[in-house]
Image: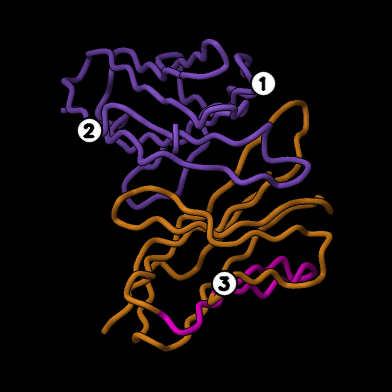
Amino acid sequence: AQTVTQSQPEMSVQEAETVTLSCTYDTSENNYYLFWYKQPPSRQMILVIRQEAYKQQNATENRFSVNFQKAAKSFSLKISDSQLGDTAMYFCAFLVPPQGGSEKLVFGKGTKLTVNP
Amino acid sequence: GAGVSQSPSNKVTEKGKDVELRCDPISGHTALYWYRQSLGQGLEFLIYFQGNSAPDKSGLPSDRFSAERTGGSVSTLTIQRTQQEDSAVYLCASSLYGLSPSGNTIYFGEGSWLTVV
């Protein structure tokens, strides 16, 4: 079974600084997708960034980038120039392409990030 | 609609009563998902629909939980004889054709917060 582990329940960072959230996963599959989602107090989950396992290049989206280490099964999220609006729960998620018709994102338990002014 | 719409946003019910939670996905999205988020936990997969069919119901916790989707659009999650452990946020999501093979984006609603007293 696939599992996702986020070892940092809570983190804080000063505005304008850089923070890295860690995520590790366990799978025997070679082809899969990885995602980071943000959940602000409004509860709506918002996709931050995604990575295809077959791509060696790390994904980036503006201030958000990942460090994808396939051999180590590690998928950390770096937030540069942190802003107050980045305060939220961040979830790492994993998807293996459909097997037997299933499409199931597996989520970690999340990291609560607080950006301090 | 512009986004995934869920209703009610909050529901308090007495133990033993039945509840229905509604999800209206983004227009044209064939894939629909239900997840459950308990306090301090990550998201737990419940069920996945492709059109009106549910290829994967493996996440439904017990036979008190059921879901249907009609017309390839609106979905209803029903919980019968509610228990206190059913208290959680129930999140619905949709995606265009599904998450694979292209890793299409999954869009979440704001959830229905269920409290069983």
Same chain? Circles 2 and 3: no
Specify the quadrant that holds the C terminus of chain B.
top left
Q: Mark 3 points at which residue?
A: A77
Foreground of the two, A67 or B61: A67
Which color was chain B given?
purple
Q: Indicate the chain on which mark 3 is placed.
A: A
- Do tags 3 and 1 sit on the same chain? no
Q: Distance between the residues labelled 3 and 1?
A: 32 Å
Residue carrying label 2: B10
| Residue assigned mark 1 | B55
Residue A43: x and y in percent read 34, 49
Task: Verify whether residue A77 appears in magenta.
Answer: yes
Say if B49 sits above or below A23 in the image. above
Mark pair 2, 3: CA separation: 32 Å
Which residue type does callout 2 highlight?
Answer: Asn
Please report the residue visible at 41 percent of the width from the left and 20 percent of the height from the top. Answer: B77
Give, as a three-letter code, the residue at label 1. Pro
Residue stretch rendered in magenta on the structure:
A64-82
Indicate which disc residue A108 carries: none
